[in-house]
Image (spheres, rainbow, N blue to C red):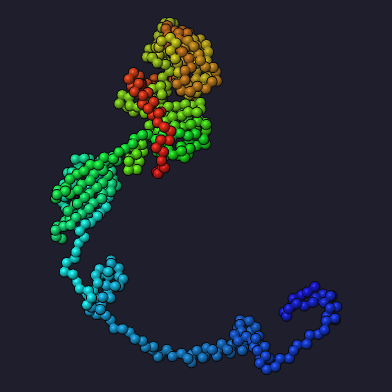
Protein backbone atom coordinates (compact mmCIF):
# COMPACT_ATOMS: atom_id res chain seq x y z
CA UNK A 1 0.00 0.00 0.00
CA UNK A 2 1.46 3.35 -1.00
CA UNK A 3 0.55 6.84 0.18
CA UNK A 4 1.58 10.09 -1.49
CA UNK A 5 3.07 12.73 0.81
CA UNK A 6 4.55 16.16 0.06
CA UNK A 7 7.77 14.58 -1.20
CA UNK A 8 6.45 11.79 -3.39
CA UNK A 9 5.46 8.18 -2.72
CA UNK A 10 5.75 6.75 0.77
CA UNK A 11 4.81 3.49 2.39
CA UNK A 12 1.81 3.25 4.68
CA UNK A 13 0.17 0.77 7.07
CA UNK A 14 1.73 -2.18 8.81
CA UNK A 15 3.49 -3.29 5.68
CA UNK A 16 5.20 0.07 5.56
CA UNK A 17 6.76 -0.46 8.98
CA UNK A 18 8.10 -3.85 7.99
CA UNK A 19 9.49 -2.55 4.75
CA UNK A 20 11.18 0.45 6.38
CA UNK A 21 13.15 -1.88 8.65
CA UNK A 22 14.64 -3.59 5.60
CA UNK A 23 15.35 -0.48 3.55
CA UNK A 24 18.64 1.29 4.10
CA UNK A 25 18.42 4.96 5.05
CA UNK A 26 18.85 7.48 2.25
CA UNK A 27 21.61 9.97 3.03
CA UNK A 28 21.36 13.26 1.07
CA UNK A 29 24.44 14.30 -0.86
CA UNK A 30 26.16 17.50 0.23
CA UNK A 31 26.16 20.27 -2.42
CA UNK A 32 28.85 22.95 -2.55
CA UNK A 33 29.53 26.08 -4.56
CA UNK A 34 27.27 27.10 -7.48
CA UNK A 35 25.18 23.96 -7.21
CA UNK A 36 24.24 24.75 -3.63
CA UNK A 37 23.26 28.33 -4.52
CA UNK A 38 21.24 27.16 -7.52
CA UNK A 39 19.44 24.61 -5.37
CA UNK A 40 18.50 27.24 -2.77
CA UNK A 41 17.35 29.78 -5.41
CA UNK A 42 15.12 27.17 -7.10
CA UNK A 43 12.68 27.27 -4.21
CA UNK A 44 13.05 31.00 -3.45
CA UNK A 45 9.92 33.10 -4.08
CA UNK A 46 10.85 36.64 -5.09
CA UNK A 47 7.19 37.89 -4.99
CA UNK A 48 5.33 35.99 -2.28
CA UNK A 49 1.60 36.29 -1.95
CA UNK A 50 0.88 39.03 0.58
CA UNK A 51 -2.58 37.63 1.17
CA UNK A 52 -1.24 34.39 2.68
CA UNK A 53 0.93 33.52 5.68
CA UNK A 54 0.54 37.00 7.12
CA UNK A 55 3.00 37.81 9.91
CA UNK A 56 5.72 35.37 8.87
CA UNK A 57 9.24 36.31 7.75
CA UNK A 58 8.31 35.46 4.17
CA UNK A 59 5.37 37.90 4.32
CA UNK A 60 7.52 40.72 5.72
CA UNK A 61 10.15 40.10 3.05
CA UNK A 62 7.43 40.33 0.36
CA UNK A 63 6.05 43.57 1.84
CA UNK A 64 9.53 45.09 1.87
CA UNK A 65 10.07 44.07 -1.74
CA UNK A 66 6.77 45.72 -2.78
CA UNK A 67 7.62 48.94 -0.95
CA UNK A 68 11.04 49.05 -2.56
CA UNK A 69 9.65 48.62 -6.06
CA UNK A 70 7.09 51.42 -5.48
CA UNK A 71 9.84 53.75 -4.25
CA UNK A 72 12.04 52.95 -7.24
CA UNK A 73 9.17 53.76 -9.62
CA UNK A 74 8.52 57.09 -7.92
CA UNK A 75 12.22 58.03 -8.06
CA UNK A 76 12.42 57.25 -11.81
CA UNK A 77 9.26 59.25 -12.70
CA UNK A 78 9.74 62.75 -14.28
CA UNK A 79 7.33 64.34 -11.81
CA UNK A 80 3.95 65.94 -12.23
CA UNK A 81 5.26 69.47 -12.48
CA UNK A 82 7.50 68.81 -15.47
CA UNK A 83 5.58 68.81 -18.83
CA UNK A 84 6.48 66.52 -21.71
CA UNK A 85 7.19 68.50 -24.81
CA UNK A 86 6.25 67.31 -28.34
CA UNK A 87 6.36 68.59 -31.92
CA UNK A 88 2.88 69.88 -33.05
CA UNK A 89 2.61 70.67 -36.79
CA UNK A 90 1.28 74.03 -37.83
CA UNK A 91 -2.33 74.16 -39.18
CA UNK A 92 -2.77 73.81 -42.95
CA UNK A 93 -3.77 76.84 -44.99
CA UNK A 94 -4.35 77.74 -48.61
CA UNK A 95 -3.72 75.11 -51.28
CA UNK A 96 -2.45 72.56 -48.77
CA UNK A 97 -5.71 72.80 -46.76
CA UNK A 98 -7.80 72.34 -49.94
CA UNK A 99 -5.80 69.28 -50.96
CA UNK A 100 -6.19 67.71 -47.51
CA UNK A 101 -9.91 68.49 -47.29
CA UNK A 102 -10.53 66.86 -50.71
CA UNK A 103 -9.20 63.58 -49.28
CA UNK A 104 -10.84 63.81 -45.84
CA UNK A 105 -14.02 62.10 -44.62
CA UNK A 106 -16.83 64.36 -43.52
CA UNK A 107 -20.63 63.78 -43.49
CA UNK A 108 -22.21 65.30 -46.56
CA UNK A 109 -25.23 66.29 -44.46
CA UNK A 110 -22.98 68.79 -42.64
CA UNK A 111 -21.77 70.43 -45.82
CA UNK A 112 -18.71 68.31 -46.49
CA UNK A 113 -17.20 68.57 -49.96
CA UNK A 114 -14.90 65.56 -49.80
CA UNK A 115 -14.57 63.60 -53.00
CA UNK A 116 -16.25 66.25 -55.16
CA UNK A 117 -13.07 67.53 -56.71
CA UNK A 118 -9.33 67.37 -56.44
CA UNK A 119 -7.58 70.54 -55.41
CA UNK A 120 -5.60 72.24 -58.17
CA UNK A 121 -1.83 71.80 -58.09
CA UNK A 122 0.99 71.72 -60.59
CA UNK A 123 -0.21 68.34 -61.85
CA UNK A 124 -3.98 69.11 -61.88
CA UNK A 125 -5.71 72.08 -63.50
CA UNK A 126 -9.46 72.89 -63.25
CA UNK A 127 -11.60 72.38 -66.39
CA UNK A 128 -13.53 75.26 -67.86
CA UNK A 129 -16.33 72.90 -69.00
CA UNK A 130 -17.34 69.44 -67.75
CA UNK A 131 -17.87 66.88 -70.57
CA UNK A 132 -21.12 64.85 -70.64
CA UNK A 133 -21.87 61.27 -71.50
CA UNK A 134 -23.12 60.94 -75.06
CA UNK A 135 -25.85 58.42 -74.03
CA UNK A 136 -27.57 57.73 -70.70
CA UNK A 137 -29.45 54.47 -70.02
CA UNK A 138 -32.14 54.61 -67.33
CA UNK A 139 -34.60 52.19 -65.70
CA UNK A 140 -37.84 53.57 -64.24
CA UNK A 141 -40.85 51.93 -62.59
CA UNK A 142 -44.45 53.03 -63.12
CA UNK A 143 -46.69 53.38 -60.09
CA UNK A 144 -49.61 53.36 -62.57
CA UNK A 145 -50.11 53.79 -66.30
CA UNK A 146 -51.43 57.32 -65.80
CA UNK A 147 -48.03 58.31 -64.32
CA UNK A 148 -46.14 57.59 -67.56
CA UNK A 149 -45.63 61.24 -68.59
CA UNK A 150 -44.54 62.26 -65.09
CA UNK A 151 -41.95 59.46 -64.93
CA UNK A 152 -40.54 60.53 -68.31
CA UNK A 153 -40.20 64.15 -67.19
CA UNK A 154 -38.45 63.16 -63.94
CA UNK A 155 -36.07 60.98 -65.96
CA UNK A 156 -34.94 64.00 -67.95
CA UNK A 157 -37.12 63.69 -71.06
CA UNK A 158 -38.22 67.02 -72.50
CA UNK A 159 -41.83 68.17 -72.42
CA UNK A 160 -42.27 67.87 -76.19
CA UNK A 161 -40.88 64.32 -76.34
CA UNK A 162 -42.95 63.23 -73.32
CA UNK A 163 -46.19 64.46 -74.90
CA UNK A 164 -45.36 62.76 -78.19
CA UNK A 165 -44.65 59.48 -76.40
CA UNK A 166 -48.02 59.72 -74.62
CA UNK A 167 -49.81 60.22 -77.95
CA UNK A 168 -48.04 57.24 -79.55
CA UNK A 169 -48.63 54.89 -76.59
CA UNK A 170 -52.37 55.63 -76.40
CA UNK A 171 -52.70 54.48 -80.02
CA UNK A 172 -51.88 50.94 -78.84
CA UNK A 173 -53.08 50.76 -75.23
CA UNK A 174 -54.89 52.99 -72.75
CA UNK A 175 -52.91 54.27 -69.80
CA UNK A 176 -55.21 52.55 -67.28
CA UNK A 177 -54.49 49.17 -68.92
CA UNK A 178 -50.78 49.37 -68.11
CA UNK A 179 -50.08 47.34 -64.97
CA UNK A 180 -48.57 49.10 -61.92
CA UNK A 181 -44.91 48.21 -61.45
CA UNK A 182 -44.17 48.09 -65.20
CA UNK A 183 -40.48 48.80 -65.89
CA UNK A 184 -39.41 51.36 -68.51
CA UNK A 185 -36.11 50.99 -70.36
CA UNK A 186 -35.16 54.55 -71.38
CA UNK A 187 -32.19 55.75 -73.46
CA UNK A 188 -31.40 59.49 -73.61
CA UNK A 189 -29.15 60.90 -76.36
CA UNK A 190 -26.70 63.81 -76.59
CA UNK A 191 -28.07 67.32 -76.14
CA UNK A 192 -26.82 70.35 -78.06
CA UNK A 193 -26.07 72.33 -74.89
CA UNK A 194 -26.53 71.97 -71.14
CA UNK A 195 -29.47 74.34 -71.12
CA UNK A 196 -31.61 71.89 -73.14
CA UNK A 197 -33.11 68.51 -72.05
CA UNK A 198 -31.64 65.37 -73.53
CA UNK A 199 -33.59 63.95 -76.50
CA UNK A 200 -35.33 60.59 -76.06
CA UNK A 201 -33.61 58.01 -78.27
CA UNK A 202 -35.51 54.81 -77.32
CA UNK A 203 -38.05 53.61 -74.76
CA UNK A 204 -39.34 50.05 -74.39
CA UNK A 205 -41.78 48.45 -71.94
CA UNK A 206 -44.28 45.60 -71.57
CA UNK A 207 -47.61 47.34 -72.15
CA UNK A 208 -49.70 44.17 -71.78
CA UNK A 209 -49.03 40.52 -71.17
CA UNK A 210 -49.18 39.86 -74.92
CA UNK A 211 -47.79 43.18 -76.20
CA UNK A 212 -44.47 45.02 -76.00
CA UNK A 213 -44.09 48.62 -77.14
CA UNK A 214 -40.94 50.32 -78.39
CA UNK A 215 -40.58 54.04 -79.10
CA UNK A 216 -37.52 55.00 -81.16
CA UNK A 217 -36.21 58.14 -82.83
CA UNK A 218 -35.88 57.86 -86.60
CA UNK A 219 -34.75 60.88 -88.56
CA UNK A 220 -35.44 63.28 -85.72
CA UNK A 221 -39.03 62.05 -85.12
CA UNK A 222 -40.33 59.46 -82.67
CA UNK A 223 -42.19 56.38 -83.94
CA UNK A 224 -43.98 53.50 -82.23
CA UNK A 225 -43.40 49.81 -82.84
CA UNK A 226 -45.81 47.19 -81.51
CA UNK A 227 -44.31 43.75 -80.85
CA UNK A 228 -46.94 41.03 -80.23
CA UNK A 229 -45.99 38.28 -77.78
CA UNK A 230 -47.27 34.77 -78.53
CA UNK A 231 -49.40 33.34 -75.70
CA UNK A 232 -50.31 29.70 -75.04
CA UNK A 233 -53.65 29.69 -73.19
CA UNK A 234 -53.97 25.95 -72.58
CA UNK A 235 -55.40 25.53 -69.05
CA UNK A 236 -53.50 23.91 -66.20
CA UNK A 237 -55.04 20.63 -65.00
CA UNK A 238 -54.07 18.99 -61.72
CA UNK A 239 -55.34 15.74 -60.22
CA UNK A 240 -54.55 13.88 -57.04
CA UNK A 241 -55.89 11.97 -54.04
CA UNK A 242 -57.37 13.92 -51.12
CA UNK A 243 -55.59 11.91 -48.44
CA UNK A 244 -55.66 13.40 -44.94
CA UNK A 245 -56.10 16.99 -46.14
CA UNK A 246 -57.67 18.24 -49.37
CA UNK A 247 -55.92 21.61 -49.21
CA UNK A 248 -52.42 20.25 -48.47
CA UNK A 249 -52.74 17.49 -51.07
CA UNK A 250 -53.85 19.91 -53.79
CA UNK A 251 -51.07 22.37 -52.94
CA UNK A 252 -48.50 19.57 -52.93
CA UNK A 253 -49.71 18.53 -56.39
CA UNK A 254 -48.92 22.04 -57.70
CA UNK A 255 -52.30 23.78 -57.59
CA UNK A 256 -52.16 27.53 -56.81
CA UNK A 257 -53.40 28.54 -53.36
CA UNK A 258 -56.23 30.75 -54.64
CA UNK A 259 -57.44 28.04 -57.00
CA UNK A 260 -57.54 25.47 -54.17
CA UNK A 261 -59.52 27.84 -51.96
CA UNK A 262 -62.01 28.48 -54.78
CA UNK A 263 -62.26 24.73 -55.45
CA UNK A 264 -63.08 23.97 -51.80
CA UNK A 265 -65.73 26.73 -51.67
CA UNK A 266 -67.33 25.40 -54.87
CA UNK A 267 -67.53 21.83 -53.54
CA UNK A 268 -68.85 23.06 -50.19
CA UNK A 269 -71.85 24.63 -51.95
CA UNK A 270 -72.95 21.15 -53.05
CA UNK A 271 -71.76 18.77 -50.31
CA UNK A 272 -70.01 18.74 -46.89
CA UNK A 273 -66.30 18.74 -47.73
CA UNK A 274 -65.44 17.32 -44.29
CA UNK A 275 -67.25 14.08 -45.17
CA UNK A 276 -65.16 13.36 -48.27
CA UNK A 277 -63.15 10.16 -47.98
CA UNK A 278 -59.37 10.08 -48.23
CA UNK A 279 -59.61 7.91 -51.36
CA UNK A 280 -61.53 10.57 -53.30
CA UNK A 281 -59.65 12.22 -56.17
CA UNK A 282 -59.76 15.92 -56.88
CA UNK A 283 -59.65 17.32 -60.41
CA UNK A 284 -58.79 21.03 -60.76
CA UNK A 285 -58.52 23.01 -63.98
CA UNK A 286 -57.22 26.58 -63.79
CA UNK A 287 -56.95 29.20 -66.52
CA UNK A 288 -53.36 29.71 -67.59
CA UNK A 289 -51.48 31.93 -70.04
CA UNK A 290 -47.85 31.16 -70.91
CA UNK A 291 -45.92 33.80 -72.87
CA UNK A 292 -43.19 32.83 -75.31
CA UNK A 293 -40.83 34.91 -73.20
CA UNK A 294 -41.37 32.55 -70.24
CA UNK A 295 -43.79 34.48 -68.05
CA UNK A 296 -46.87 32.66 -66.70
CA UNK A 297 -50.21 34.10 -65.59
CA UNK A 298 -52.69 31.91 -63.70
CA UNK A 299 -56.37 32.71 -63.96
CA UNK A 300 -59.47 31.66 -62.09
CA UNK A 301 -60.88 28.17 -61.44
CA UNK A 302 -62.42 26.76 -64.63
CA UNK A 303 -63.48 23.27 -63.51
CA UNK A 304 -64.00 21.50 -60.17
CA UNK A 305 -64.23 17.72 -60.31
CA UNK A 306 -64.42 14.89 -57.79
CA UNK A 307 -64.20 11.17 -58.52
CA UNK A 308 -62.91 7.85 -57.22
CA UNK A 309 -65.42 7.56 -54.36
CA UNK A 310 -69.14 7.59 -53.60
CA UNK A 311 -69.27 11.36 -54.08
CA UNK A 312 -68.78 12.30 -57.73
CA UNK A 313 -69.02 15.83 -59.05
CA UNK A 314 -68.35 17.76 -62.27
CA UNK A 315 -68.84 21.52 -61.83
CA UNK A 316 -68.30 24.19 -64.46
CA UNK A 317 -68.97 27.96 -64.29
CA UNK A 318 -71.53 29.13 -66.86
CA UNK A 319 -73.42 32.34 -67.47
CA UNK A 320 -77.17 31.92 -67.72
CA UNK A 321 -79.69 34.77 -67.94
CA UNK A 322 -76.96 37.28 -67.21
CA UNK A 323 -75.82 35.53 -64.00
CA UNK A 324 -72.69 33.41 -63.53
CA UNK A 325 -73.28 30.14 -61.68
CA UNK A 326 -71.72 26.69 -61.26
CA UNK A 327 -73.56 23.87 -63.07
CA UNK A 328 -72.93 20.14 -62.84
CA UNK A 329 -72.48 17.78 -65.78
CA UNK A 330 -76.26 17.38 -66.25
CA UNK A 331 -76.77 21.15 -66.50
CA UNK A 332 -78.17 21.59 -62.97
CA UNK A 333 -77.14 24.81 -61.23
CA UNK A 334 -77.04 25.78 -57.61
CA UNK A 335 -80.14 26.18 -55.45
CA UNK A 336 -81.13 29.46 -53.86
CA UNK A 337 -83.38 29.85 -50.84
CA UNK A 338 -83.64 28.51 -47.30
CA UNK A 339 -85.48 25.27 -48.15
CA UNK A 340 -85.86 23.25 -51.30
CA UNK A 341 -89.19 23.31 -53.13
CA UNK A 342 -90.81 19.97 -52.27
CA UNK A 343 -92.47 19.55 -55.67
CA UNK A 344 -92.52 21.21 -59.08
CA UNK A 345 -95.90 22.94 -59.39
CA UNK A 346 -98.02 25.92 -58.40
CA UNK A 347 -99.55 26.85 -55.04
CA UNK A 348 -103.27 26.03 -55.27
CA UNK A 349 -104.24 26.65 -51.66
CA UNK A 350 -102.67 28.73 -48.92
CA UNK A 351 -102.11 28.49 -45.18
CA UNK A 352 -104.87 29.51 -42.72
CA UNK A 353 -108.63 29.22 -42.18
CA UNK A 354 -110.63 27.97 -45.19
CA UNK A 355 -113.72 25.99 -46.12
CA UNK A 356 -112.77 22.34 -46.64
CA UNK A 357 -113.66 21.28 -50.22
CA UNK A 358 -114.98 17.85 -49.09
CA UNK A 359 -116.20 18.35 -45.52
CA UNK A 360 -117.89 21.68 -46.34
CA UNK A 361 -117.08 23.60 -43.13
CA UNK A 362 -114.40 26.12 -42.23
CA UNK A 363 -111.36 24.84 -40.43
CA UNK A 364 -107.62 25.50 -40.15
CA UNK A 365 -105.50 24.53 -43.15
CA UNK A 366 -102.14 23.80 -41.56
CA UNK A 367 -100.11 23.80 -44.76
CA UNK A 368 -100.11 24.74 -48.44
CA UNK A 369 -101.25 22.73 -51.45
CA UNK A 370 -98.96 22.42 -54.48
CA UNK A 371 -100.82 21.32 -57.63
CA UNK A 372 -98.77 18.83 -59.66
CA UNK A 373 -99.28 15.86 -61.94
CA UNK A 374 -99.97 12.48 -60.39
CA UNK A 375 -96.69 10.60 -59.77
CA UNK A 376 -94.51 13.75 -59.84
CA UNK A 377 -91.44 13.52 -57.54
CA UNK A 378 -91.68 14.87 -54.01
CA UNK A 379 -88.36 16.04 -52.52
CA UNK A 380 -87.14 16.58 -48.96
CA UNK A 381 -87.07 20.31 -48.28
CA UNK A 382 -83.91 20.00 -46.17
CA UNK A 383 -81.64 17.40 -44.60
CA UNK A 384 -83.14 15.46 -41.72
CA UNK A 385 -84.43 12.16 -40.31
CA UNK A 386 -87.77 10.56 -41.26
CA UNK A 387 -89.95 10.67 -38.15
CA UNK A 388 -93.04 9.03 -39.70
CA UNK A 389 -93.75 7.34 -43.04
CA UNK A 390 -97.12 5.64 -43.59
CA UNK A 391 -100.91 6.06 -43.62
CA UNK A 392 -102.29 8.98 -41.56
CA UNK A 393 -106.13 9.46 -41.72
CA UNK A 394 -107.12 12.37 -43.94
CA UNK A 395 -103.51 12.98 -45.03
CA UNK A 396 -103.46 9.62 -46.81
CA UNK A 397 -99.90 8.48 -47.39
CA UNK A 398 -97.92 10.88 -45.21
CA UNK A 399 -94.23 11.54 -44.44
CA UNK A 400 -92.95 13.65 -41.57
CA UNK A 401 -89.27 14.68 -41.44
CA UNK A 402 -87.44 16.14 -38.42
CA UNK A 403 -84.75 18.64 -39.52
CA UNK A 404 -83.44 19.54 -36.07
CA UNK A 405 -83.36 22.89 -34.27
CA UNK A 406 -87.12 22.60 -33.75
CA UNK A 407 -88.00 22.45 -37.48
CA UNK A 408 -89.96 19.72 -39.25
CA UNK A 409 -91.88 19.22 -42.50
CA UNK A 410 -94.85 17.08 -43.55
CA UNK A 411 -95.86 15.72 -46.99
CA UNK A 412 -99.41 14.40 -47.52
CA UNK A 413 -101.71 12.76 -50.15
CA UNK A 414 -98.72 10.84 -51.62
CA UNK A 415 -99.18 8.08 -54.16
CA UNK A 416 -95.91 6.43 -53.12
CA UNK A 417 -93.60 6.51 -50.12
CA UNK A 418 -89.91 5.88 -50.88
CA UNK A 419 -88.42 6.17 -47.38
CA UNK A 420 -88.92 4.48 -44.01
CA UNK A 421 -88.96 5.54 -40.37
CA UNK A 422 -85.54 6.55 -39.00
CA UNK A 423 -83.96 6.98 -42.41
CA UNK A 424 -81.72 10.03 -42.90
CA UNK A 425 -82.51 12.01 -46.03
CA UNK A 426 -80.57 14.80 -47.69
CA UNK A 427 -81.87 18.01 -49.13
CA UNK A 428 -83.43 17.53 -52.56
CA UNK A 429 -83.66 13.73 -52.20
CA UNK A 430 -86.87 12.20 -53.61
CA UNK A 431 -88.88 10.74 -50.76
CA UNK A 432 -92.22 10.10 -52.46
CA UNK A 433 -94.57 10.92 -55.36
CA UNK A 434 -97.57 13.23 -55.77
CA UNK A 435 -100.91 11.43 -55.34
CA UNK A 436 -104.57 11.73 -54.36
CA UNK A 437 -104.81 9.61 -51.20
CA UNK A 438 -106.78 10.61 -48.11
CA UNK A 439 -109.30 13.50 -48.16
CA UNK A 440 -108.27 14.97 -51.50
CA UNK A 441 -110.15 16.28 -54.54
CA UNK A 442 -107.29 15.73 -57.02
CA UNK A 443 -103.57 15.03 -57.37
CA UNK A 444 -101.57 17.51 -55.33
CA UNK A 445 -99.03 17.70 -52.49
CA UNK A 446 -100.12 18.92 -49.08
CA UNK A 447 -96.96 20.45 -47.53
CA UNK A 448 -96.62 21.51 -43.88
CA UNK A 449 -93.85 23.26 -41.93
CA UNK A 450 -93.49 22.93 -38.14
CA UNK A 451 -91.52 25.05 -35.69
CA UNK A 452 -91.26 23.61 -32.19
CA UNK A 453 -94.23 21.36 -32.98
CA UNK A 454 -96.54 24.19 -34.12
CA UNK A 455 -97.59 24.49 -37.77
CA UNK A 456 -96.42 27.74 -39.45
CA UNK A 457 -96.95 29.12 -42.93
CA UNK A 458 -94.47 27.32 -45.23
CA UNK A 459 -94.42 30.35 -47.53
CA UNK A 460 -92.91 32.42 -44.73
CA UNK A 461 -89.67 30.59 -45.52
CA UNK A 462 -88.16 31.16 -48.95
CA UNK A 463 -88.09 28.08 -51.15
CA UNK A 464 -85.07 27.03 -53.12
CA UNK A 465 -85.19 27.74 -56.83
CA UNK A 466 -83.24 25.26 -58.92
CA UNK A 467 -81.53 26.54 -62.06
CA UNK A 468 -81.22 24.20 -65.04
CA UNK A 469 -79.78 24.58 -68.52
CA UNK A 470 -81.73 23.44 -71.55
CA UNK A 471 -81.74 23.65 -75.32
CA UNK A 472 -78.81 25.43 -76.93
CA UNK A 473 -77.36 26.52 -73.60
CA UNK A 474 -77.14 22.92 -72.44
CA UNK A 475 -75.47 21.86 -75.71
CA UNK A 476 -72.88 24.64 -75.51
CA UNK A 477 -72.27 23.86 -71.84
CA UNK A 478 -71.61 20.18 -72.52
CA UNK A 479 -69.32 21.06 -75.44
CA UNK A 480 -67.20 23.26 -73.20
CA UNK A 481 -67.18 20.60 -70.48
CA UNK A 482 -65.93 18.02 -72.98
CA UNK A 483 -63.24 20.42 -74.19
CA UNK A 484 -61.94 20.95 -70.64
CA UNK A 485 -62.01 17.25 -69.80
CA UNK A 486 -59.78 16.68 -72.85
CA UNK A 487 -56.99 18.80 -71.32
CA UNK A 488 -54.06 16.50 -70.44
CA UNK A 489 -53.42 15.98 -66.76
CA UNK A 490 -50.50 18.04 -65.56
CA UNK A 491 -50.33 20.12 -68.75
CA UNK A 492 -48.31 23.24 -68.16
CA UNK A 493 -47.45 22.26 -64.58
CA UNK A 494 -44.92 24.65 -63.13
CA UNK A 495 -43.56 25.71 -59.78
CA UNK A 496 -46.13 27.69 -57.83
CA UNK A 497 -44.79 30.99 -56.49
CA UNK A 498 -47.27 32.78 -54.25
For residue 111, side relative to residue 66 (left or right): left
**Residue found 24% across the figure and 72% down from its top:** 118
Using the rendered view, name the quadrant where residue 25 is placed. Answer: bottom right
Q: Nearer the viewer, residue 250 or 376?
A: 250
In the picture, the quarter occupied by the N terminus is bottom right
Q: Nearer the viewer, residue 375 or 350?
A: 375
Q: Residue furthest front?
A: 219
**Residue found 30% across the figure and 26% down from its top:** 322
Using the rendered view, name the quadrant where residue 69 is placed. Answer: bottom right
Q: Residue furthest bottom?
A: 33
Q: Position of residue 297 (x, y in %)?
A: 35, 40
**Residue found 14% across the figure and 58% down from its top:** 192
Q: Position of residue 11 (x, y in %)?
A: 79, 77
For residue 85, side relative to residue 129 (left or right): right
Using the rendered view, name the quadrant where residue 478 is placed. Answer: top left
Question: Is residue 326 at all visible to an observer of this figure?
Answer: no
Question: Is residue 225 at all visible to an observer of this figure?
Answer: yes
In the picture, the quarter occupied by the C terminus is top left
Q: Nearer the viewer, residue 285 or 41?
A: 285
**Residue found 84% across the figure and 78% down from its top:** 19
Q: Position of residue 413 (x, y in %)?
A: 46, 11
Q: Position of residue 107 (x, y in %)?
A: 30, 68
In this rendering, the answer to whether 426 lies above or below 56 is above
- The total of numbered circles placed on residues is 0
In this rendering, the answer to whether 284 lies above or below 126 is above
Amino acid sequence: MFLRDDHGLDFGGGAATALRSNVPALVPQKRTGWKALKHRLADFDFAPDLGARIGTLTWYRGAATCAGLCALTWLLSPGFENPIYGNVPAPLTGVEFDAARAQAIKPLGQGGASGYHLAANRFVAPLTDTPERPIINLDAKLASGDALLGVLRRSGVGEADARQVGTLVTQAVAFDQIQPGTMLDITLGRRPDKGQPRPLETMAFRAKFDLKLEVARNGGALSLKQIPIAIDRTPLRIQGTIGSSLYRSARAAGAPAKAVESYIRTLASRMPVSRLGSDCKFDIIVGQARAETGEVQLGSLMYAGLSGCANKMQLLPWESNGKMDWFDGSGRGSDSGAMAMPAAGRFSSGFGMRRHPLLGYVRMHKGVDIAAAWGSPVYAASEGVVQFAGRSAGYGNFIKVNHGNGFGTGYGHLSRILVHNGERVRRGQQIGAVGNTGLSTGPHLHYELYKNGVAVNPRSVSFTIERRLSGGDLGAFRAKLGHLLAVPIGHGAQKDED
